[in-house]
């Protein structure tokens, strides 16, 4: 049996920055997803969850990392990476992000009944 670390997200891009690091292009962006649940009174509550995503160089599904822009709907396939580090003040912290292997931009006409979000 092989190990599996696969994460699939479909949501809206928050911030998006493309930079160059050691000669390679990297895009760091956030994606928000939503889950609906009922509160104690039976009212529908929408819970947003934010994910940090990192994409390096050319990614299948994109012509350029510059295509990833705030407000777009995307479908991201990648793996979860968790890193532990110590701050300059000596505090231990944990950071998690998604390393993208594939990114698809979802055209507005394919969003169906999904409402527009302004995150």
Image: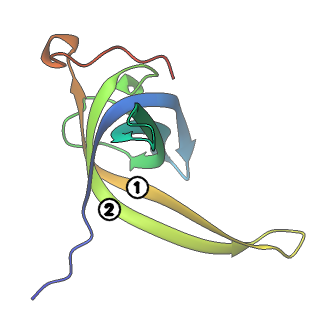
- Where 46 sits versus 56, above or below? above
Foreground residue, 39 or 56?
Answer: 39
Mark 1–mark 2 CB contact (< 8 Å): yes
Residue at x 14% of width, y 84% of height: 2
> As drawn, is 117 to the left or to the right of 15?
left
Residue 6, horizontal then vertical, whole percent: 24, 63
Residue 41, horizontal then vertical, whole percent: 44, 37
- Where 89 sits versus 106, above or below? below
Residue at x 81% of width, y 73% of height: 91
Residue 42, horizontal then vertical, whole percent: 38, 36
Decide: few, some or many residues near mark 1? Use Cα within 10 Å; few <14, some 14-19, many ≥20.
many
Residue at x 80% of width, y 68% of height: 87
Decide: few, some or many residues near mark 2? Use Cα within 10 Å; few <14, some 14-19, many ≥20.
some
Q: Residue furthest front?
A: 41
Q: CA distance from mark 1 to mark 2?
A: 5 Å
Residue 85, horizontal then vertical, whole percent: 68, 73
- Mark 1 or mark 2: whose residue is earlier in sequence: 2
**Looking at the figure, which quarter contains the N terminus?**
bottom left
- Where 5 sits versus 40, above or below? below
Foreground residue, 26 or 96?
Answer: 96
> As drawn, is 118 to the left or to the right of 35?
right
The residue indicated by pointer 2 is 79
> As drawn, is 103 to the left or to the right of 18?
left
The residue indicated by pointer 1 is 98
Q: Residue furthest left?
A: 1
Quarter of image, res 81: bottom left
Q: Residue furthest right?
A: 89
Foreground residue, 47 or 114?
Answer: 47
Residue at x 13% of width, y 18% of height: 110
The disc placed on residue 39 is: none
Q: Residue furthest bottom?
A: 1
């Amino acid at each position: 049996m092989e190990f599996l670390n696969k994460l699939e997200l479909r949501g809206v891009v928050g911030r998006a920055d493309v930079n160059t690091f050691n000669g390679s292009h990297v895009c760091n962006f956030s994606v928000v997803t939503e889950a609906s649940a009922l509160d104690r009174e039976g009212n529908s509550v929408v819970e947003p969850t934010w994910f940090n995503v990192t994409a390096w160089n050319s990614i299948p599904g994109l012509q350029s990392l510059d295509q990833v822009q705030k407000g777009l709907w995307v479908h991201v396939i990648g793996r979860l990476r968790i890193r532990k580090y110590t701050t300059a003040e000596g505090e231990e912290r944990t950071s998690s992000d998604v390393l993208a292997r594939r990114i698809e931009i979802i055209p507005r006409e394919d969003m169906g009944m999904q409402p527009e979000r302004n995150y």
